[in-house]
Image (cartoon, helix red, strand yellow):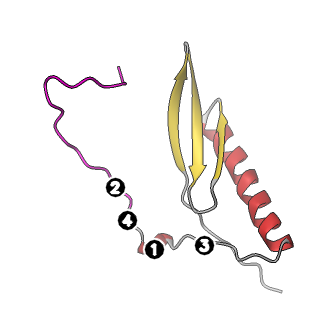
Amino acid sequence: MRTQVLNYRIIIEPEKQGKKVVYNAYCPTLGVADYGDSIDEVLKSIKDGIKLAIEYLADEGKEIPIDNIKDQTVTTAEVELPANAKTSFA
């Protein structure tokens, strides 16, 4: 039996908690989220969460959503901030 490997998009964002920074990870296709003290830690943790979500869906006989990474474009947009605007970042 051949093993199929799935590839999922994960978004990681830092979050300040007092003087400490934690990293939040989110897999939008499966709705899985987690956090960790480092990027490596949160990547390991979110990967475990993704595996659990897939196992649960398989056990329930539900369809497993798949990210089609090759057809997606992930980018950013740089825009000017109005002079009187306030932001939440330092």
Q: Tell me the distance, in whole angstroms, between the alpha carbons under discs 1 and 2.
A: 14 Å
Residue for point 55% across, 70% down: 67
Q: Tell me the distance, in whole angstroms, between the alpha carbons under discs 1 and 4.
A: 8 Å
The residue at which mark 2 appears reads as 75
The x, y position of residue 32, in whole percent, is 66, 52
Q: Magenta stretch?
A: 74-90
Q: Are marks 3 and 1 in contact (CB under 8 Å)?
A: no
Check disc 3: other Cα within 10 Å, few if <14, some if 14-19, many if 20+: few
The kind of residue tagged 3 is Ile
Looking at the rendered structure, which numbered label has been put on residue 70? Answer: 1
Looking at the rendered structure, which numbered label has been put on residue 73? Answer: 4
Task: Judge whether residue 2 is colored magenta.
Answer: no
The kind of residue tagged 1 is Lys
**Residue 60 versus residue 48 in the image, above or below:** below
Tell me the quarter of the image containing the N terminus.
Answer: bottom right
Comes first in the chain, label 3 or label 2: 3
The x, y position of residue 49, in whole percent, is 74, 52
Comes first in the chain, label 1 or label 2: 1
The kind of residue tagged 2 is Thr
Q: Tell me the distance, in whole angstroms, between the alpha carbons under discs 3 and 1.
A: 12 Å
The residue at which mark 3 appears reads as 66
Comes first in the chain, label 3 or label 4: 3
**Residue 52 versus residue 38 in the image, above or below:** below
Name the residue nearer the viewer: 66 or 4: 66
Q: Is residue 54 left or right of residue 79?
A: right
